[in-house]
Image (tube, helix red, strand yellow):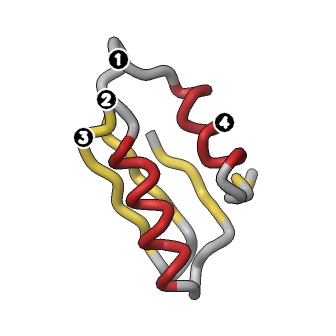
């Protein structure tokens, strides 16, 4: 899955985002592109739902961009 978040130039926020994602049961990989805020997430759909990832990020203060 690919989403966009508003952390493009903040290294600390990018590291926090990756850490949060990798702690979720089912997330296999999370890569953040600091140039445009693109986040590519590889996860097991049998262990984790798309909406759960988005709500976890929102609860932790990350704004998902359209």
Gap in angstroms between the C-alphas marked 3 and 2: 6 Å
Mark 4: few/some/many CA within 10 Å (<14, 14-19, 20+): few
Q: Position of residue 27 (x, y in %)?
A: 32, 37
Q: Earlier in the sequence, mark 4 or mark 3?
A: 3
Distance from label 1 to label 3 (Cα)? Answer: 11 Å
Task: Please determine whether, in this image, residue 6 is positioned above or below residue 25.
Answer: below
Q: Quick one: label 2, few (<14), some, or many (20+) residues within 10 Å?
A: some
Image position, residue 23 (x, y; %): 36, 44
Q: CA distance from mark 4 to mark 2?
A: 15 Å
* Disc assigned to residue 26: 2
The residue located at (68%, 69%) in the rendering is 6
Image coords of residue 66 (percent x, y): 75, 51
Badge 1 vs badge 2, beta-carbon distance below 8 Å: yes
Task: Identify the element where label 1 is drawn.
Answer: loop
Q: Would you place residue 1 above or below residue 49 in this image? A: below
Could you tell whether 40 is left or right of 17 in the image? left
Label at residue 66: none
**Residues at badges 1 and 3 in contact (C-beta under 8 Å)?**
no
Q: Which residue is mark 3?
A: 28
Circle nearer the N terminus (1, 3): 3
Label 3: element kind: strand
Residue, x 56% and y 69% (percent of image)?
Answer: 37
According to the picture, the residue beneath numbered tag 1 turns out to be 47
Sequence-first disc among 1 and 2: 2
What mark, if any, has residue 55 been given in the picture?
A: 4
Location of residue 15 with respect to 21 vertically, above or below = below
Callout 2 secondary element: loop
Contact check, label 3 and label 2, Cβ < 8 Å: yes
Residue 5 lies in quadrant: bottom right
């Amino acid at each position: 899955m690919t989403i966009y978040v508003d952390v493009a130039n903040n290294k600390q926020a990018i590291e926090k985002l990756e850490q949060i994602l990798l702690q979720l049961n089912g997330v296999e990989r999370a890569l953040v592109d600091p140039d445009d805020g693109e986040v590519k997430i590889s996860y097991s759909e049998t262990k984790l739902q798309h909406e759960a990832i988005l709500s976890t990020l929102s609860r932790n203060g990350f704004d998902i961009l359209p």
